[in-house]
Image: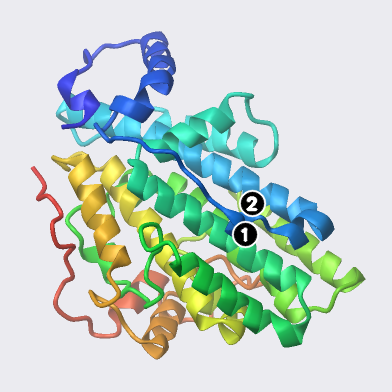
């Protein structure tokens, strides 16, 4: 049972009491929020990203800030989900989403608070040691992939990416499968879309970060080192920050989860396996957020364990490369944030991205084995 389910809050609690509770939980969450046993985390050499660190430190810094903002969200979303479940209603806390958007924007702009790093780590630890290690290892893999693209000649990059995939899979307890998962799981699992429907802007904010990570590969796969590549990196970075401005698309959050076939085709050309791992991590994080935010999940640790088993399984609900690419493109490049290096002002599809997903005809709904049923 979740920590907050054991300690229901008064319906008229004040903002001050909530803030005090959050500070207390920063100290106790890693050990007690969901009853997980925590273990030491070790990322290892995969995340060193030496080429980025040496030649493109601004890209590495943006990635660090994105990871920190996401960790802060996980921390606060774990608390928010507990509050909502304890309240007996399905309604998000008033002002939570607006405050979190403002706070996360400050983090990615480098204007966050000194304690944000510690809070971000607590947010990962709230998932339990196993899921936290999956996320940390996956982020290290993403950094290393971008660094390989940035630091090696065209003739060597595929080999280095293959080595990175092998190193990633050398830790089976932390590695997701490289077989692409069927996207239907985003819409069919027991608590599907609870994060998206309850906190649409927060989901969009996270998707903007997914877009940047994928888009950052394109200047390295498409442009030779030099001034033009630097300009391409600046273009991607500026377009990312423009997505946080509440303007008109593409200067707004993506409305569909960004995936490699739509945003980073150059990565797929060099290493389909790396791109598939990347997209599986994005979908894994989306389903985790659904569980944290859901007002109905009766067993958060059990649900997270089931999700992790599902995304590690190389045979369950997987598809082939062609279907993965087709399904991602059916969601629309425009709706996933648009091209990294050229401007899109309207969709390339004649339907919205979500409708395009279902235009394939669909099939029986997917489930996650072992996922606790909703209350």
Quadrant of the drawing holding the C terminus: top left
The answer to which of 163 and 190 lies nearer the viewer is: 163
Q: Answer with left or right where residue 300 lies relative to residue 240.
A: left
Instruction: Tell me if mark 2 has few (under 14), some (14-19) or many (20+) residues whose alpha carbon lies within 10 angstroms of its own.
Output: many
If you read the primary sequence from the N terminus, does the residue marked by circle 1 or circle 2 appear first?
Answer: 2
Q: Is residue 193 left or right of residue 165?
A: left
Residue 145 vertical position relative to residue 37 in the rendered view, above or below? below
Q: CA distance from mark 1 to mark 2?
A: 8 Å
- Please tell me which residue lies in front, 189 or 273: 273
For the image, the number of numbered tags is 2
User: Is the N terminus in the top left, top right, bottom left or bottom right quadrant?
Assistant: top left
Name which residue lies at 80% across and 58% down: 56
Residue at figure coordinates x 37%, y 76% from the top left: 180
Asked whether residue 207 is in view, the answer is: no
For residue 55, the mark is none
Image quadrant where residue 325 sits: bottom left
Name the secondary structure under disc 2. Answer: helix
Residue displayed at 69% across by 73% down: 218
Of residues 87 and 349, which is closer to you in this image? 87
Q: Is residue 163 left or right of residue 236?
A: left
The residue that disc 2 covers is: 63
Q: Secondary structure at mark 1?
A: helix
Residue 240: x and y in percent read 65, 56
Residue nearer the viewer, 354 or 166: 166
Q: Which residue is mark 1?
A: 143
Residue 221 image point, x, y percent: 71, 78
Residue reaching furthest right? Answer: 227
Residue at (39%, 82%) from the top-left corner? 324
Do the residues bearing badges 1 and 2 touch, measured as CB atoms within 8 Å?
Answer: yes
| Colouring style | rainbow
């Amino acid at each position: 049972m979740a920590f907050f389910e054991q300690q229901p809050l008064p319906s008229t609690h004040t903002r001050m009491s909530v803030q005090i509770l959050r500070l207390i939980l920063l100290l106790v969450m890693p050990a007690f929020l969901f009853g997980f046993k925590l273990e030491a985390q070790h990322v290892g050499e995969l995340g060193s990203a030496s080429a980025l660190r040496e030649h493109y430190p601004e890209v590495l810094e943006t990635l660090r800030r994105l990871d920190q903002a996401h960790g802060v969200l996980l921390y606060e979303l774990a608390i928010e989900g507990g509050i909502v479940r304890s309240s007996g209603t399905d309604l998000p806390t008033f002002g939570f989403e607006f405050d979190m958007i403002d706070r996360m924007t400050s983090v990615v702009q480098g204007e966050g608070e000194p304690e944000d790093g510690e809070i971000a780590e607590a947010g990962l630890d709230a998932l339990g040691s196993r899921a936290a290690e999956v996320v940390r290892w996956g982020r290290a893999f993403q950094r290393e992939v971008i660094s390989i693209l940035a630091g090696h000649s065209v003739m060597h990059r595929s080999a280095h990416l293959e080595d990175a995939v092998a190193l990633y899979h050398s830790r089976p307890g932390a590695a997701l499968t490289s077989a692409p998962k069927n996207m239907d799981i985003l819409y069919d699992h027991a608590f599907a879309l609870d994060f998206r429907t309850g906190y649409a802007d927060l989901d969009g904010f996270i998707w903007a970060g997914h877009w940047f990570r994928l888009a950052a590969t394109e200047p390295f796969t498409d442009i030779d080192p030099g001034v033009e590549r630097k300009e391409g990196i600046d273009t991607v970075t500026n377009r990312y920050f423009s997505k946080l401005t509440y303007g008109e698309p593409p200067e707004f959050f993506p409305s569909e989860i960004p995936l490699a076939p739509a945003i980073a085709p150059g990565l797929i050309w060099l290493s389909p396996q790396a791109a598939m791992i990347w997209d599986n991590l994005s979908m894994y994080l989306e389903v985790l957020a659904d569980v944290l935010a859901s007002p109905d999940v009766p067993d958060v640790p059990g649900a997270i364990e089931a999700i992790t088993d599902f995304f590690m399984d190389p045979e369950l609900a997987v598809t082939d490369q062609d279907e993965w690419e087709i399904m991602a493109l059916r969601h629309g490049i425009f709706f996933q944030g648009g091209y990294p290096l050229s401007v899109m002002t309207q969709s390339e599809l004649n339907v919205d991205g979500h409708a395009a997903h279902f235009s394939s005809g669909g099939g029986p709904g997917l489930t996650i084995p072992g996922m606790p049923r909703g209350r």
